[in-house]
Structure formats: structure tokens, C-alpha cells
Image (spheres, rainbow, N blue to C red):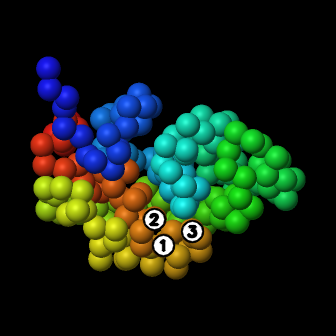
Amino acid sequence: MTEPIRCTWTGMATDPMYIAYHDEEWGRPLTGDDEVFERVALEAFQSGLSWLTILRKRENFRAAFDGFSIPKVAAYTEQDVERLLGDAGIVRNRAKIEAAINNARAAMDLPDGLSDLVWRHADPDAPVPRTMADVPATTPGSKALAKELKKHGFRFVGPTTAYALMQAIGLVNDHIEGCVARSR
């Protein structure tokens, strides 16, 4: 039996968690303020690291950050920052932890919510990439999203991180042509 075609960003990974994420979650439309906030936070924590590292720590992140409840994280204090810096189950980077808290506070101030703001940048007509070489690192849409998030006070949301978010939550579908997850 032939192995199904998958996007090569998976590195032809054999880790079941990575394959499940690719096949069942990445690129699927995701809405909801807390749900989108989780992805914004995780994309920022991933910066400079392997996505598999973040996936393996994801449940720890969810526990440490109160399920990424925006109001709960927005209320965090310096004591919470210290608690998170001591949590070996997550990425212990002060700047990223403080950015997540800051971003929750910024999300609280959005008049239409975080999900609506992000989804205004959806690009359902993006071309289908034939190979991973056809997938950009940034797009005009990701630059606009990053700019808008920064305007509202978000941190760790540059155009590359914004594009990774767009891919992860289905604002674009960058599964390559023929990928088993392309049409799901």
C-alpha cells in the first residue's frame, strides 16, 4: 500500500502527534476568541523552535495558561509570570510569556473580538501550492494582519508568525496539491 502524500513541512515525520496535527487540525477553519488566542500564543512560543516541540508541550501550555482563557490570562500578575518561568512543561522564555499576557490584555480591548479581527484577513482564493517551495513565508495579508495586531498592542506577531497563524487556523489552505489533508 502506498503512503499518502503529506505536506513536506512535516519532514516526513513518523511522530503520530505530528501526523494527526497535520491531517486533522492544520489548515482547518478555527474560530472563537480563546481558540484563536491559543494559536496566537503558541505561534509566538514556537518562534525559533520546532513546531513538534510546541505540540508535545501543548497540553502543559493549556494547563499553565488556564486553557488560554483571555480574561484569565489578561488578569495574570508578576507572580504568574514567575510561576510560568518555573514550569518545565512549557517554553520558559520571559519575553514570550509576557507577550502572551500582554496579548490577552490587548484582545480584551478589541471591540469585535480577536477571532473576527483575524478572520477579516482570510484568503480563501490563495493559489493551491504544488510543492512546499510554492508556500510563502509571508504574504500581503499576513503583513496586514501583523500590522493590525501590532496597532492594537499585540507583541510577537510579525508577518511570518501571522502567516503561520493564518495557515494553522485555515485563513489560507497551504496543504500542497495531492496532500491527503487538502480537501478534508
Q: What residue type is disc 3 on?
A: Phe
Is residue 34 in view?
Answer: no
Q: What residue type is disc 1 on?
A: Gly
On screen, residue 129 versus residue 24, left or right, reads left
Q: How many marks?
A: 3
> Label 3: how many residues lie within 10 Å, few (<14), some (14-19) or many (20+)?
many
Q: Are marks 2 and 3 in contact (CB under 8 Å)?
A: yes
- Which label belongs to residue 158? 1
Q: Residue at the spot x=51%, y=69% of the render?
A: 157
Q: What is the C-alpha distance between the residues marked 2 and 3? A: 8 Å
Q: Is 107 located above or below residue 2 in the figure?
A: below
* Screen quadrant of the N terminus: top left
Q: Secondary structure at mark 2?
A: helix
Lower sequence index among marks 2 and 3: 3
On screen, residue 105 versus residue 135, left or right, reads right
Q: Secondary structure at mark 1?
A: loop
> Label 1: how many residues lie within 10 Å, few (<14), some (14-19) or many (20+)?
some
Q: What residue type is disc 2 on?
A: Thr
Percent position of residue 184, x then y: 20, 36
Q: Which residue is mark 3?
A: 156
Q: Are marks 3 and 1 in contact (CB under 8 Å)?
A: yes
Q: Residue at the spot x=35%, y=45% of the render?
A: 11
Q: Secondary structure at mark 3?
A: loop
- Which label belongs to residue 161? 2
> Label 2: how many residues lie within 10 Å, few (<14), some (14-19) or many (20+)?
many
Relative to the observer, which residue lies in front, 180 or 150?
180
On screen, residue 89 versus residue 70, left or right, reads right
Q: What is the C-alpha distance between the residues marked 2 and 1? A: 5 Å
Relative to the observer, which residue lies in front, 141 or 177?
177
Percent position of residue 81, x then y: 80, 55
